[in-house]
Image (cartoon, grey):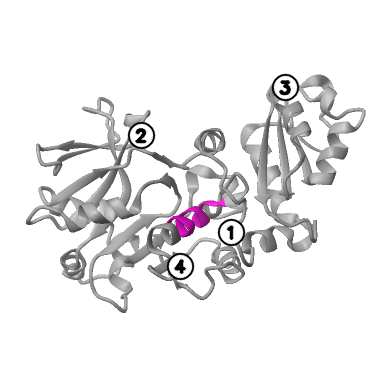
Amino acid sequence: MNVILLAAGLGTRLRPLTDILPKCLMPIHGRPQLEYWLRALDAACGQGGADVLVNTHYLPELVRAYLAASPWAARVRQAHEEELLGTGGTLLANSFAAPGPVMLVHADNLCDADLNAFAGAHIARAAGVAITMMSFRTDSPRSCGILELDGRGVVRAFHEKVADPPGNLANAAVYIVEPEVTAFIASHKRPVVDFSTEVIPNFKGRIQTWENTCYHRDIGNVGSFLAAQDEYPAPTPAAPEGPDGWRELCLRDGGALPRAFAMALAGALELPFAEGVAAPGGTPALLYAGDDRALEAALSAPKGIAALAPGSIVAIGCSAGAPSLPRSLIQERGCRSLTVCSTTSMIGL
């Protein structure tokens, strides 16, 4: 399977979080979003069964550092874009050893789907279909591209972020495209091509849908980022076997990155940032602890858990699995915990 994981975007709606991390590395249960896709592809295709390319543009050094120290270092190609090419331009600019269809994935979406069933639907597509589009049921149809289908499940109309959408079946921004789509993009004779506005409309009537009934969420803003922490199950094991690039990145410079991310989250939510003790005055705050030991010390301090106001967030930089008691105490206080890096090793923490 040929796959492009689109990881170059600016993530402007997620600022100030994306001032610290690119959108594709947003931590969900302590692991970056990009990793969820890499694990899913391994599960679907076997290790090495997919030819995977990741494009970069915004904060590329962080994506490169993560991948270089990860189990996928030797199996994932990277393509840096000095200028954003658009999804269509990225597809056009990159080739694969084995010609054939390409799966295009916006890697800043959090998704649990049967990728083999998705690929199987494309293989079994009706005559004339050139694109298989993943779809999902959204709880906010006004903020999505809503689809109208014919009796065959082929798209007959798009409604992009309209005030009165005709339903809640949305485009998940995950596609499998045939080589003729790349040929159509090449006919534009320019490097930058937007997929949603310059490609998709020209294939209306030739795009079938496959509905993902498991889970799909665009981590497009801070509210959605926090919702995903509540909705999506934590991965098991917490970190993949082998080298842990995320852990290495988060331990650099004394854990500067997780701390900066926690400070950005506090700023986005307009919460006071406190480290080691809860903010005075009984007001909600973001309490930061660099690791599990610091968390236990902070929560047992005189101004620790007892001073933690409901609505607060306890953010942990790097965790190898804090005891359940502190986490249960956090929940009992009407607060939430958030981990930037979950790992399986205490070494270096």
Which element is circle 4 on? loop
Is residue 8 visible to the viewer in this orientation of the structure?
no
Which element is circle 1 on? loop
Q: Nearer the viewer, residue 212 or 159?
A: 212
Task: Name which residue lies at 15% across and 66% down.
Answer: 180
Instruction: Report the span colored magenta.
Output: 32-40
Q: Would you name the residue on which mark 2 appears?
A: 143
**Marks 2 and 4, the one that precedes in the sequence:** 4
Res 279 quadrant in image: top right
Which element is circle 3 on? helix
**Residue 38 in the image, given as x and y percentages of width and height:** 47, 60
Q: Are marks 4 and 3 in contact (CB under 8 Å)?
A: no
Q: CA distance from mark 2 to mark 4?
A: 36 Å
Q: Would you name the residue on which mark 3 appears?
A: 332
Left or right: where 256 falls relative to 85: right
Whether residue 174 is in magenta: the answer is no
- Of labels 2 and 1, the one closer to you: 1
Which element is circle 2 on? helix
Q: CA distance from mark 4 to mark 3?
A: 41 Å
Q: Would you name the residue on which mark 1 appears?
A: 240
Name the amino acid type tagged 1: Pro
